Image (tube, rainbow, N blue to C red):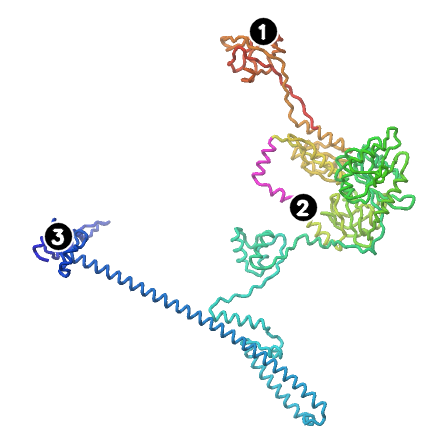
Amino acid sequence: MSDSDGKKTLGLRSGPRSGNVKQSFSHGRTKNVVVETKRKRVVVPKPGAKPASDPSDGSKGASKPQTRPDGITDSEMDRRLKAVQAAKAREAEEQAQREAEEKQREEERQRRRQETEAKEREEREREERARAKAAEEERKAKEAAEAAKQAAAAPAEDPGHPAAKQPAADRRKPEKAREDRSKSGKGARDSGRRSGKLTLNQALSGGEGGRQRSMAAMKRQQERARQKAMGQQVEREKIVREVQLPEAIVVSELAGRMAERVADVVKSLMNMGMMVTQNQTIDADTAELIIEEFGHRVVRVSDSDVEDVIKEVEDKESDLEPRPPVITIMGHVDHGKTSLLDAIRNAKVVSGEAGGITQHIGAYQVTTDSGAVLSFLDTPGHAAFTSMRSRGAQVTDIVVLVIAADDAVMPQTVEAINHAKAADVPMIIAINKVDKPDADPDKARTDLLQHEVIVEKLSGDVQDVEVSAITGQGLDELLEAIALQAEILELKANPNRAAEGAVIEAQLDIGRGPVATVLIQKGTLKQGDIFVVGEQYGKVRALINDKGERVKEAGPSVPVEVLGLNGTPEAGDVLNVTDTEAQAREIAEYRKNAAKEKRAAEGAATTLEQLMAQAKENENLTEMPIVVKADVQGSAEAIVQAMEKIGNEEVRVRVLHSGVGAITESDIGLAEASGAPVFGFNVRANAPARNSANQKGVEIRYYSVIYDLVDDVKQAASGLLSAEIRENFIGYAEIKEVFKVTGVGKVAGCLVTEGIARRSAGVRLLRDDVVIHEGTLKTLKRFKDEVSEVQSGQECGMAFAAYEDIRPGDVIEIFEREEVERNLD
């Protein structure tokens, strides 16, 4: 670069500028540090300077001046261009190298694929050759065996054959040689029995001893070896199991039944969003998903399988014997059902019933003059005993519908007709009380037409008999009709089998314990039999018939009282005889737990939102809690159903507890905690319960007729109803003028146009027939005197309490409120 460029000569300076910095530390220590400062080189071109041309370019460089950043010299520009060119060359080189490597890898993959295919092809060809060779050897072996058999048979038949003349010792030599060869072959096979193929000859000869590997096992081993040689992952074959799944199962037990690791099962459950441990219980549906996910088969089993011991045995036609018919007497209350049965039995049951109405379901056996045996069920007619009548219709063969000739068809008569139709049981109409002067049997027959019951007298198919329980008229005709209907039904049962029956009624007797009235339907119940009935079980200690006599056994259609239960069953439960007491106990416990879980599930299913909504709905609802104890299960059930029907949207009766037996201290404790009275129906409180009730102030009421109990509860519930407020309009007054009185405010000068204006009454201010204020009067004056009331046609002054927006022409409406007591319908 020449001096004429106008630039300074470049040269090396002594280096960057340096300086000393003194650093101070603790305890008086110091240190000198040399600090160097490098200056940034800034190149500033001279004004008007032209870029130098490259001498190698000649005129070309002058014609096309290079564009470069300001302050960049030719040498710097050359260095930059060379660097760019070198980078581009290096990038092209790397690209070519990458393409070459990719091509090489593709060739390697192709080569490996071809080798694998060649190996598989070679393996298949080898297997085909081995199969062909095995088949050839098998064919040759069969031919050799056939030839040997023929050769062995020929010398024996031909005495002149050379082999026949050969000594026995010489003949044994080849056999010995064959044995040696087989032994040597066996040793060779034993040494390599785990490797190589199992040929057909080896399988047929059985040279491998007692335990031989199957052809499938050999194929599996070869497949695993081939996969291992090809580098594939060898997976163990999955064993599909049948997993028995109950309604709930512990996670660890589920893993054991599937033969899977517990950790894998827990992991699968966590993937499903269930954070459980191996000791927690999961439901059957979740467990089924897990089993299917692991590839096993589900076999659902249930806790109810314990009831499989109660087998439904189909009786053979040859084992069936005729049985007495079961007749249920149904009808409206006080139509003479029990009196009619008394006339048939020559007994006096009605006189023993409280109030002269039947409140229990009774079961009796009657022997007619002709020697026929009939089983009668007498059901209550009161509206509260609907479930009792339903049970009677379900276990009966014939329904005798009693209708009073002077009362015709009534509500419970219609209900009994519906029960009989629902149970598909034939009916016989007994028109009772025909001896009364106002009896009209034809009206009863025509009323039945409305309910699709057409009697024979009106060309129908339902038998009807006119009877009188008082005079005995028509009783023989009624028994003949029952016998005819029973003959048409051809009732049969097998007495020589395990007994099965239905509980008609159950009670808790103080001296005898739980007692159930059972109607035997199949088989024969004997003393000493072990049975299960509903949630209870027991052993028959005694059987008592309807006459109060002890019997050893009871056959089909025989009603008996059964003693020996561990608890009081529900009316309507089915009695089944079991083989052992353990079976009966297990079934009873399962049923009890199932009922408990069902009750718990019903309570647990309520969400918080539902509880809040229910509380909001019941905000204005008043409950009357009661405790009910009855003599028999059916009566307790009827009372609870009657209590549920009492009430409206403001008041309802809530039965805290209902049971069978005497009133005990626990009942008093429950009643005291809830502030409830205790109702006893044909039962009494024992001495400790009475003392406890006196101390705690709990009211005990005794009843023997269900009418009285229901009426008293209705009356008590009516007392909880809020009184109804009624408004009575007593007068109207028109404002004529408005005055302003000091100390009082605005006073309306009024004229009473109708009725009376009273100081104590409520008032409404009407403007253009629109109510704008409702309140009370502050003052009512006649002239200057304060009065209590003003008659119609008189003038007076009125001032409203805390309201003064009154104008002339407004109308004042005067009314009184009164409270009216309400009753439950």
Nearer to us of marks 1 and 2 is 1
Q: Which residue is mark 3?
A: 50
Residue 579 in sight: yes
Q: CA distance from mark 3 to mark 1?
A: 124 Å
Contact? badges 3 and 1 (CB < 8 Å)? no
For the record, the magenta segment spans 594-619
Q: Vertical placement of 764 versus 454: above or below?
A: above
The residue shown at (65%, 34%) is 674
Q: CA distance from mark 1 to mark 2?
A: 77 Å
- The secondary structure type at the circle numbered 2 is helix
- Looking at marks 2 and 3 on the same chain, the residue that comes earlier in the sequence is marked by 3
Q: Which residue is mark 1?
A: 795
Q: Which residue is mark 2?
A: 595
Contact? badges 1 and 2 (CB < 8 Å)? no
Tag of residue 229 = none
The C terminus lies in quadrant: top right
Q: Position of residue 301 (x, y in %)?
A: 65, 55
- Looking at marks 3 and 1 on the same chain, the residue that comes earlier in the sequence is marked by 3
